């Protein structure tokens, strides 16, 4: 969970970004990873 004022990134957004930027990985599974940090969203 991000702190107030920070953006949550959805799986859908990550899938879209990966597909656009790395087409060779467009079919890779994307799974969020629970993190206690708030600087990065992990997938």
Image (spheres, rainbow, N blue to C red):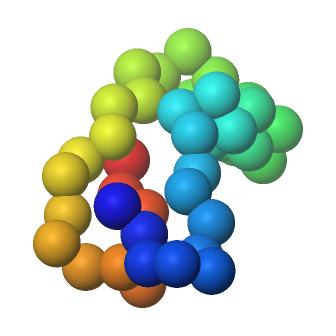
Across and down, in percent, residue 14 comes to: 61, 41
The mark tally for this picture is 0
User: What residue sits 40% from the left and 21% below the top?
Assistant: 29
Quarter placement of the N terminus: bottom left
Up-down relation of residue 3 to residue 7 (above or below): below
User: What residue sits 44% from the left and 78% below the top?
Assistant: 3
Residue 22 seen anywhere in this rendered image of the structure: yes
Q: Quadrant of residue 23?
A: top right
User: What residue sits 20% from the left and 64% below the top?
Assistant: 35
Across and down, in percent, residue 19 comes to: 73, 31
Residue 15 seen anywhere in this rendered image of the structure: no
Q: Quadrant of residue 8?
A: bottom right
* Relative side of 8 to 21, left or right: left
Up-down relation of residue 17 to residue 38 (above or below): above
Which residue lies most toward the right here?
20
Across and down, in percent, residue 11 comes to: 53, 33
Which residue lies most toward the top here?
27
* Relative side of 23 to 15, left or right: right
* Relative side of 17 to 2, left or right: right
Across and down, in percent, residue 15 comes to: 63, 31
Q: Nearer the viewer, residue 32 or 8?
A: 8
Q: Nearer the viewer, residue 2 or 14?
A: 2
User: What residue sits 75% from the left and 32% below the top?
Assistant: 16
Up-down relation of residue 9 to residue 38 (above or below): above
* Relative side of 14 to 22, left or right: left
């Amino acid at each position: 969970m991000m702190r107030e004022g920070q953006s949550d990134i959805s799986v859908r957004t990550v899938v879209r970004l990966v597909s656009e930027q790395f087409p060779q990985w467009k079919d890779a599974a994307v799974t969020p990873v629970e993190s206690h940090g708030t600087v990065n969203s992990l997938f």
